[in-house]
Image (cartoon, rainbow, N blue to C red):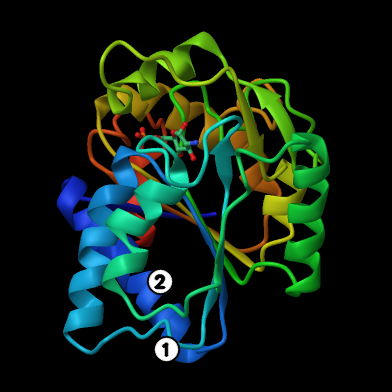
């Protein structure tokens, strides 16, 4: 794992955006794996800025998002499709129809999960998968005890995940209990993964993922088994790492 520790959340977002921009520049037909959540908002802001500056084009790229809530139509204000449209897709040049998310409103969510997995395989799998990190160590919506070889399927969300995400649901509405998520095996097939975690609240999960045992208890720890995993952290998220001096020594910037 390549562990990059940046001074603050803004610097971490900038670095992550630069890595994504470099990917689509090196391979314009890249298949990107995209994520949602608060951490990604800053990453997408920086990516849009790079696009506007002429440093990143998505015209030849396609994308697959990690997950979507079951029961929310794509035009629901709290759906991840809406999040992605507002925070990224409507502000870059990705082709209409090239940006994929699971359909949360599908009548048969299990069949939709299978269709989504097949679509990723048909696209040749993902070149660069962007990941956030849940407080409980989840990647995508792969909650603790998810099979480390799972593929796209339905998952029941943990209470802590629903509480953390309830800020996106106004008027006391609660996030759905179920989501369709890429599996851990799906994510591990990506040729490169880029995890971004910022803020002190993530420090425990970050330490478990990087320095703990590989375990379904902390699903992100599976990245220890990936050949090309980059983890971009800020100082606060890195604060519980035992070997922090070593990581800073290897990548002093
Ligand atoms: C959500 C998403 C994850 C994301 C995580 C972290 O539950 N499904 O893909 O990585 O939360 O979110 P945040 O950046 O808001 O902490």
| Residue 218 percent location from the top left of the image | 60, 26
Q: Residues within 10 Å of mark 1 (few under 14, many from 20)?
A: some
Residue 62 vs residue 229, the one in the foreground: 62
Q: Position of residue 205 (x, y in %)?
A: 46, 26
The answer to which image quadrant residue 113 occupies is top right
Q: Residue at x 38, y 24 (%)?
A: 165
Which quadrant contains ligand 1? top left
Q: Which one is in front, 53 or 198?
A: 53
Image quarter of residue 200: top left
Residue labelled with disc 2: 20
Asked if residue 142 lies left or right of residue 48, the reply is: right
| Other-residue count near label 2 (Cα within 10 Å), few / some / many at <14 / 14–19 / ≥20 | many
Q: Quadrant of residue 71?
A: top right
**C-alpha gap between disc 2 and disc 1:** 9 Å
> Which SS class for mark 2?
helix
The residue at which mark 1 appears reads as: 25
């Amino acid at each position: 794992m390549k562990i990059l520790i940046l001074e603050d959340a803004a610097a971490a977002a900038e670095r992550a955006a630069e890595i994504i921009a470099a990917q689509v520049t090196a391979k314009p037909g890249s298949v990107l794996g995209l994520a949602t959540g608060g951490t990604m908002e800053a990453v997408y802001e920086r990516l849009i800025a790079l696009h506007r500056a002429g440093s990143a084009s998505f015209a030849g790229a396609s994308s697959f998002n990690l997950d979507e809530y079951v029961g929310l139509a794509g035009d629901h204000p709290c759906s991840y499709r809406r999040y992605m449209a507002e925070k990224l897709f409507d502000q870059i040049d990705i082709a209409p129809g090239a940006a994929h998310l699971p359909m949360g409103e599908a009548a048969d969510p299990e069949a939709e999960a299978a269709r989504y997995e097949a679509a990723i395989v048909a696209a040749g799998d993902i070149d660069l998968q962007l990941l956030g990190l849940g407080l409980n160590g989840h990647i995508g919506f792969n909650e603790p005890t998810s099979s480390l070889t799972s593929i796209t399927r339905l998952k029941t969300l943990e209470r802590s995940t629903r509480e953390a995400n309830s800020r996106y649901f106004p008027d006391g509405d609660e996030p759905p209990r179920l989501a369709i998520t890429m599996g851990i095996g799906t994510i591990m097939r990506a040729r490169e993964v880029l995890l971004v975690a910022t803020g002190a609240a993530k420090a425990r999960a970050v330490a478990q993922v990087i320095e703990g045992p590989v375990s379904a208890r902390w699903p992100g720890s599976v990245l220890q088994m990936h050949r090309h995993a980059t983890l971009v952290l800020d100082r606060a998220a890195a604060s519980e790492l035992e070997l922090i001096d070593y990581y800073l020594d290897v990548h002093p910037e």
